[in-house]
Structure formats: C-alpha cells, structure tokens
Amino acid sequence: MKQRQFLTTLAATLMMSLGAQAQQHQFTVNTKPGAPVQSTMYGIFFEDINFGADGGLYAEMVENRSFEFPDRLMGWGTFGNVTVSDVKPAFDRNPHYVTLESAGHHQKVTGLENRGFFGMGLKKDMTYDFTVYARLHNLQGKEAKIRVEIVDDQDVPIDRKSITIGNNKWQKYTVQLKSNKTVAKGLMRIFLESAEAVDLDHVSLFPSDNWNGLRADLVKDLEDLHPGIFRFPGGCIVEGTDLETRYQWKHSVGAAEDRPLNENRWNYTFPHRLYPNYYQTYGLGFYEYFLLAEKIGAEPLPVLSCGLACQYQNGDNDKNAHVAVDDLQTYIDDALDLIEFANGDVTTKWGKLRADMGHPKPFNLKQIGIGNEQWGPMYPERLKPFVEQIRAKYPNIKICGSSGPTAGGKDFDYGWQEMRKLNVDLVDEHYYCPPGWFLKNAGRYDNYDRKGPKVFAGEYASHVAGKDGEPTVAKNNWEAALSEAAFMTGLERNADVVWQCTYAPLFAHVDGWQWRPDLIWFDNLKSVRSVNWYVQMLYGTYKGTNVLQLTENGKPVEGEDGLYASAVYDKPTKKFIVKIANASDQPKQVVLNFKGAKNLATAQVISLHADDKQATNSLEQPNNVVPKESELQANGSNLTLTIPAQTFQVVRL
C-alpha cells in the first residue's frame, strides 16, 4: 500500500514538473475513417546521379566493360601490346573490343587492369563471377590462354584463374574468383599467357550475391523503406543535355551485352564535381527497374521524354534542341510501346520481348510520366498528343504531368493551369528548400482543389543552409530530416489530394557524388541509411489505409508551438496511428483524445530523436540516429505523451 502511494506521489510530482516545462496540448482524433491513403503514398525516386546506377545499385564492378567510352580505354590500364578494334565485333551496338598480342619479348607481358568505380570493393569469403567474350585473334590460331586476377590494395593477387580460348568465333567464358580478405579499393588484372593473340569484349565482374545484377545491400535498403511507388529512371537524364543523349528505354532492354552506351547528363554538369568517366551502360535498364519494383513491392512509375531536351541547358527558341510538335510520333510510340512491354500479352512485339527476357507475366503498369520538370508553353503543347493517344489506346493508364522545377511562382501556376486543361491524372511537384520552408508549408495542401488532378510530390528534400561556401552541407542531418517529418504530416492529412510522394535523390557514392543531400550513401562495400531514410521508412511502414481527422481547438496541428501531427487508421491491423513532430527546443506534453474509441490498449511509441540538429548517420557511425521503441498505457480513450524537443514520434494503438 505504501509503495503504491509512493508511486502515485512520484507520478504526480513528475506531471507537475513536466507541466512547469511544457504546455499541455489536447489533440482530438476522430476515429471515423476518412479519405483513403493510396498504396502509392510514400515511395522512392531513382535517378542515375551520384553514381547511383553504374558504380552503385548496378553491381557491375568493371568500368567501361565494353570499351565503348569515347576514350575507348578510359578506366583501363594497359601494358604490353594492347589495341582497340571494331572489325567483326561480338555485338553490333557495342562494336569495340581489345586485342591482346605478344609483347615481343619472353620477359615482357601483355595485359590490362581495371580498378572499377573508385576502386573495387572485395569482401572476405565472397565469390566473384568473371565473364568475358573472347576469340582467337588470328583465323588460323590454335589455342590461347588468359589469366584473370583479383588484387588487393597492396598489389598482391588474392585469387587467379586461367581461361583457354580455342575458337576464332566469339564465345562467352566464365570463372569464379574468391576473396580471402576484405579490401576497400582492389582491382582486377588480365594477362595474356600465350603467344597466340586474343580478342576480348564485355569484360565483367559481379559479386555472387547480386540480385538480378543489382547490389544486394542496396536493394535491401530500398525494400525496407516499404515503398508504394517507384519512379524511374530520372530526373534530368530523361531529358538529356540534348535529345541524342536522353534516356531511351528501348536501348535499355534485351541482352545487356548489346545495350548501347549513353552519356550521363551529370558527368560534366558541376565543374567543381566533374566526372568525365560518368556514362550509362544501360546494364540497369527498364526491365531491371520493373523487376526491382516488383521485388520491393512498389508500383512502377516510368518517366519518358516529351521531346524537350533539358530546358536548363537549352534555350526554348533553339530549334535544334527540341522536337517540333509535328515530329513527336516516334516519342509517342515509345510511350505506347513501353506500356505494351510492361503489360502486353506475350503475343505482342514488346510483350514477347519481356517474356523472352524472363518475365511472361505482365508488370501491371498503372501510370506513366511524360516529361520531367518542364515549364512554359512548350510543354503542354507537346504533352497534349501524348495524352490523346495514350488515353485512346490505354484508357486505364494514369498520366503524370509536371508543374515545373519550383514550388510556386508564375511557371508553377501556369503549369497547373495547363495540366488541368489537359486533365492529367497527377501533377508532379518538385521542391528543394530550406528546413524553414518545410516547417512553414505543412498546410500547403489544405486548400488545394479537390476536383482537379492529384498531387505527386515527385522530388523533394530539405536543404540545410550552406557552410564554407558550399551550397549545402555534405550530410543529411537531423534538422533537415525533422523538418521533412513535420511537413509530411501535411501530406498525410491531405491524402485525398496528395496521392504519392518521393524524396530525392535516392543514392550517392561517397567518392563520386554531385548532389547532396541524398537518402542513402554508400561506398563499394557498405551503405548507410541517413536520418532522412528513417523518417521515410516510418511513414512508409505506418502509412495506414484511411486518414483520421486530428485537430487542436478545431484546427489542424501544423506548427503552432512547434508541433505538427496527423493520424490514420490501418484496416488490416485495426490500429490507430498518430505521427507527431516536435520541432521546438522544448519538450511538449500531448494528450491524444480518440473520439469514439473505448478501452484503448497499450500503445507502441516509436521515437526518432537527436539532441544535436547537426546529427547524422555515417558509414562509420550508421546507427547514430535510429528509431527507439517504448510502450505507454492508454487511459480509456485517452493517451498522454511527453514528446522531447527535436523529436519525431509514431504512436500506434
């Protein structure tokens, strides 16, 4: 009895103490399910920037594997007698290959080496699949031999295998190599071991744990976000610096060995972060994107060119930069053919190709984007014939248009006006803004027109103010992540008009980035989930099925006293889910009153918090800021929470 009195007195003392520190807020949650939350509500956007594809998600370890870079031997070191040729190639669209001939002296050797993308990451006990297409160089040749090695950062071979070539026709050869140690920046060497010369093409090295050619750890990072939508392949690369270098999906399907090289729009965009070796092999192509969407449980959203090259890099009046409206049919055909590739029967041309690649069943494509972030009159006049022809042939496919690259202003308003006229299904909005903007705009969608197109927040990220002359800090810090968490309560509250959203960019190589912040950082051995990743994961994991009205004094909770909140109901689990961000520097006490609920059970509370706004997760300290779970007991239809300063919480009961 005395113990119970002591605990009661202690609890009362704590409550009085908290009351002195924090004003108590009364939030009312109407438990009657409201507007549905789309399954696509929270997702991911992929663009091949920051070496996100080649050198990143695409697990190929060899740079310039087919010798098709404009500098044919870029990425390769050679010794002895190595030449490049294109006579009777193995692959028509990748015609160049190397010839290894005798160095001319018994004490000299011929060969080449490749250090991959910023070095080759080799893992202890991992096997690596080496493949090469080879033939005897001379028609009357008898037999040639090459040796392949993986080598550590001290120039010591780790493993080696020999391959014998006895045919003057192109053949594929495969061997496995195993690493007995972990090496951050290794390399691969190939030696000619015979007097007989050989031709080599498509020299490849993959870790054996790859998933359909993709890095297993990065795929897991995406899967654990529980994304509902997957937008690909960009971004500005969809447009290209010029139309010749735009992303063309038809070049990215079929045999990987015969997918032609494309220049990456980001290889020279930032002079202070110049990567002249940044190209697209298309090894990660549309087929792989569709497979990945299926793997991670996300609906695919491919984006195609509307016939405009990047408007940042080309004048609107440059007739050589953009396709005339009357000449758009091949671009429109690309969109129609893509839908057939994704959904068509195996008896159709493009459906058969999908089946031949290993996926007879349709990918169940439901929406398509036309254009990236175009602006001005040139865009809607080109989008119009796309809309007309797609709707005529595929009336159930949703079309996503664009409101341009900014969050407001003349071009933004014009874009929305024209998207309404064209009656597109979704409008893609982009905003890269400071944390203060995100905190002030949590009510952005409260008064949007509910009768028009739905919103797709296709690219957004909170950018912390620069340091030391840099446009942004190199980190994804807690200040940025918390502001995003606060803003996203407004997305969730307005799920009747906001149907999907995706943070951007997705990936960045620590040795090869051009743009920051980014959701996932990686090197050649491991990755780190940023603090922003955990915010996105919590929203994606606990998105619910229906919006619940949450108010304080009859108003949405969108910034007063530093608090932001939203609520949903999840039908499968029969749970109420409340998300609260405390962006202030003081703890806040909140009482959640669930109107219409009775006898609420124990609540699961998931907290994401950092004392320091500059806190980050890094490859060295990946768990610096991660969610922590606790439990609270509800009192009838009420639950009392104390939310620490600078904290995002998910409450589930």
Image (cartoon, rainbow, N blue to C red):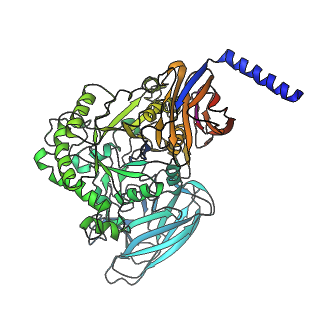
| Quadrant of the rendered image containing residue 217 | bottom right
In this orientation, which residue lies closer to the viewer: 477 or 420? 420
Left or right of 499 in this view: 218: right
In this orientation, which residue lies closer to the viewer: 633 or 528? 633
Q: Is residue 634 above or below residue 202?
A: above
Query: In the image as oriented, which residue stretches furthest toward the top?
Result: 20
Instruction: Report how many numbered discs are placed on residues in the image.
Output: 0
| Quadrant of the rendered image containing residue 651 | top right
Residue at the image position 60 percent from the left and 42 percent from the top: 622
Residue at the image position 39 percent from the left and 56 percent from the top: 289
Q: Is residue 316 above or below residue 243?
A: above
Residue 585 visible in rendering = no
Q: Is residue 616 above or below residue 19?
A: below
Q: Position of residue 641 (x, y in %)?
A: 64, 28
Query: In the image as oriented, which residue stretches furthest toward the left?
Result: 326
Q: Position of residue 322 (x, y in %)?
A: 17, 43
Residue 371 visible in rendering = yes
* Magenta region, residue range: 646-650
Residue 648 is one of the magenta-drawn residues: yes
Q: Is residue 348 above or below residue 495?
A: below
